[in-house]
Amino acid sequence: MWALVTVLVALTTVFWAYAPAMHGGFLFDDTFQQFALPAASSPLASWIGPVRPVLMFSYWINSQISGQDTYSFHVFNVLFHCFTTFLIFAIVRRLVGRLTGLPNQTRDLLAAFAALVFLLHPAQTESVAYIAGRSESLSSLFAAAAYAIFLYRPRAAVSWVTSAALLSLFALAVFSKEQAIVLPALFLLTDVWLNPGQAFRAIRGNWRLYLPIAAVGLAAVAVFRNLIMSIGTGSGGGSAGFGMKDLTWYQYLFTQFRAVFVYIGTFLFPVHLTLDWDFPISKTILDHGSIIGLVVLAALAAAAWHFRSRFPLAALGYFVFLLLLSPTSSILPIRDPVAERRMYLPMLGLLLIVVDCVSRLKIDRKVLAAACLVLPLVAAAVTHARAEVWSGPVPLWEDTVRKSPNKARDHLQLALAYYDQGSFDRASAEYQKAAELAPPDYNLLLDWALAYDGLNQPEMALAKLQQAAAMEPTAHVYSQIGMVYGKRRQWKEAMEALDMAEKIDPTFAMTYYYKGVVHLSLTDFTAAAAEFAKALVQDPTLQPAREGLAQAQQAQRVQLRRKR
């Protein structure tokens, strides 16, 4: 009965905690995903490819349910988080039972406490409230399911049936996000830990698992390696991979010697949560105290191994934490060295340490139970506040800029959010700050110009557009120049700019749309209709061109009647 009540209260609490973000729109990387683009209406086959097919299938289901209404996406994210939480309860319960001599009631209480902290910890918000964060939670769901089956298998030696189930879940986890590649290492670590003095025998007894999973793991490494190399060396660089020219594997490793402690600190004191950490890169082992981080990590590893008999759960938790964090916190360079979503499943290791420490407190069980309830409720309140930040682009980027004021990217994103809101003055101010922090590129100048246009400052808009055109003479920028000149009724200059845009790229639909607008303003309805028709040939979905064509044709009919 109490178990059922606890589950219902936990479900109610987690949905309350994430309620502010449940109707939030697509944010940041969401806007580049297929579910947020016109291609969302494409058949399933176009969604499924070599990159995270299981994740993309889950997005396709949401797209079928609600189109671009984000509510079902958020509900799925919370449900995946709940299922993973149940598995965390089962995993902690099993490990506490195997590694300690605690009574069953205490074991269940501590496992429930760990699960509630996992469920409601504010550091999990990025993986749950952020639709693109699903890659983390879905991959972790399958990985946790595999680990739970591994721990609860009926016999010490893995059977073929169990092996097949573990391999299937391993594949689902990897094809949701590649970081699950460390799952076989987690199995090995657990076999070593739970069988002191007989680890080799235990591993050899599980050959039905380790031989096939080694083959699958090598294949997954090959796929993962090709993926990260292609991402890192693609046009324009990329955000991850060994091909990143400005961030080597060893510089990233040096940086991660410090970043690991950010994750630990965030777990213990989640007061500085942010989407975009301003975390400097350590170019050498001496930069920013990286060598101190390495020494402390090594000392903690040595202590965990030395005291593994006395503190088996905490020692295991330390190695589980580092192992699960290793795909993103070791030698694979990633543009952002710190991201809160990366500690989603690695939090399991930290929870094992906490459970070991709490289990040694000499306090009354009722007092312990009350404390184990109060802390998750406090965490839920903080998570609720954090979910409000994730409710829309403006609060998200205002929060991020406040915590990372020296990152040009964050000011740029805030400017875009203000622009979409119609706050052109605030957008322009943020573009200015971004340009002061880093040399403005083509995209910043183009967007900045549109903000000035919204403020009815055409001279400033044209100045920024001409700067952008000097960097990259594209059809887009010249069409915007033509648009601004057209608003000023400078028809000659407008048509010159639009002719240049057409010369650069004859397939750019907006060029013909703006030409149609110019001709419409000059009451040349026949020419206007022809230009709008050209725009629709290039982009049949361009609704403004369709409306312009209808307006031009209607004006032609009126003009013809008057002539009669």
Image (tube, grey):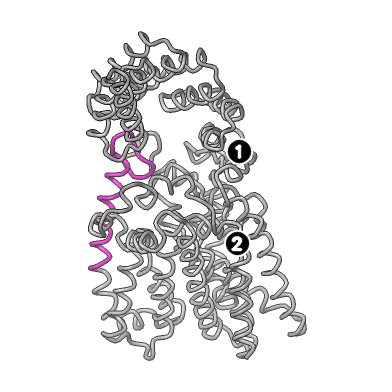
Q: Amino acid at mark 2?
A: Ala
Residue at left 53%, top 39%?
286
Placement of 459 over or under 62, stated as above or below: above
Q: Which residue is mark 2?
A: 19
In depth, the one of 552 and 111 nearer the eye is 552
Query: Dividing the image into 4 quarters, which one contains the C terminus?
Result: top left
Question: What is the residue that sits farthest to the front in this orientation?
Answer: 564
Q: Nearer the viewer, residue 10 or 493?
A: 493
12 up-or-down from 461: above or below = below
Residue 290 x, y percent position in the rendering: 54, 44
Dot 1 falls on a residue whose secondary structure is helix
- Residue that appears at 55% across and 20% down: 456
| Disc 2 to disc 1, C-alpha distance | 24 Å
In the image, is 330 to the left or to the right of 456? left
Residue interval drawn in magenta: 215-242
Q: Which mark is residue 401?
A: 1
The picture quadrant where one finds residue 178 is bottom left
Q: What's the residue at 42%, 72% (across, down)? A: 189
